Amino acid sequence: MTSPDRRLLRLGVNIDHVATIRNARGGLHPDPVRAAIVAAEAGADGLTVHLREDRRHITDTDLTRLSEATALPINLEMAATDEMLNIALRERPHAACIVPERRAERTTEGGLDAAGLHNSLAPIVRQLRDNGSRVSLFIAPDAAQLHAAAALGAPVVELHTGPYSHAEGAAVAIELERLQAMATLGARLGLEVHAGHGLTFDNVGPVAAMPEIAELNIGHFLIGEAVFIGLAEAIRQMRAHMDAARA
Ligand code: PXP
């Protein structure tokens, strides 16, 4: 049974890498839609998918099938391009998270330059909002980027936890302090604060404990762990780590 308190911190499960495995053989298995159904049963609060320019994860068809097959809110990660904007306007996901995208990168490497790209992002944010999607900007935990996101009228920011999750030694505390300070600033600016990237059972606790953070988006670790303990169990254990940190 889900307690209302627990829902103060939502878990968005990123199922991209189920599609990555499927795509490795070019067939239909494993199906990200099946993963979405398992995730819903295991207690995920939402699904996150990144429709990349090269379609290396989910495809356009997956996105449509996911919307039809699950009642969970979908958070569509998207580059700020005309192609992705048109797809997002057509599919009208619950949330649209604008991310920087480079074809050669293995995963989203840095945050969006919301400050430097204000003029090109402004019409995209406005159109997505007007179309009913909750717009989120995936940014580095940096004060200038938070102010820029607020100036763009984005209701949500997702703080990039990659530098924290890759940090070692004394740098871990520094990155955590930075995340906490920027989560506090985000809340003060009236932004809903999410976080994600590189989170695991071992490092999720201190981020989940930050009271301003409303949602964590977690993918690669969960899908990797699913190989050993199953997807439902990986999600349940992640949820338990998050709840323990919040308690
Ligand atoms: N949030 C955003 C914006 C991302 O781009 C990703 C990776 O696709 C994630 C969260 C999830 O990161 P990870 O797969 O490392 O858990």
Image: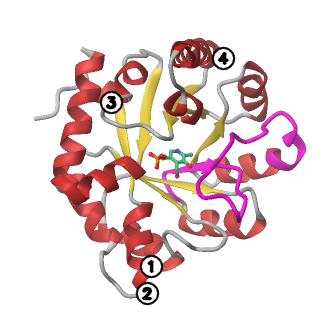
Mark 3 CB lies closer than 8 A to ligand 1: no
Residue 202 marker? 3
**Secondary-structure class at tag 1:** helix
Please provide the residue range marked out in magenta: 93-121
Residue 189 marker? 4
* Disc on the earlier residue, 4 or 2: 2
Depicted 13 relative to depicted 202: above or below = below
**Secondary-structure class at tag 3:** loop
**Residue tagged by mark 2?**
26
Look at the numbered discs 3 and 1 and tell me whether their residues touch, using CB distance below 8 Å: no
Residue 195 marker? none
**Which residue is rendered at x = 30% and y = 75% of the image?**
30
**Amino acid type for the residue under numbered disc 3:** Asp
**Residue tagged by mark 1?**
23
Q: Is residue 221 left or right of residue 225?
A: right
Place residue 156 in its image quadrant.
top right
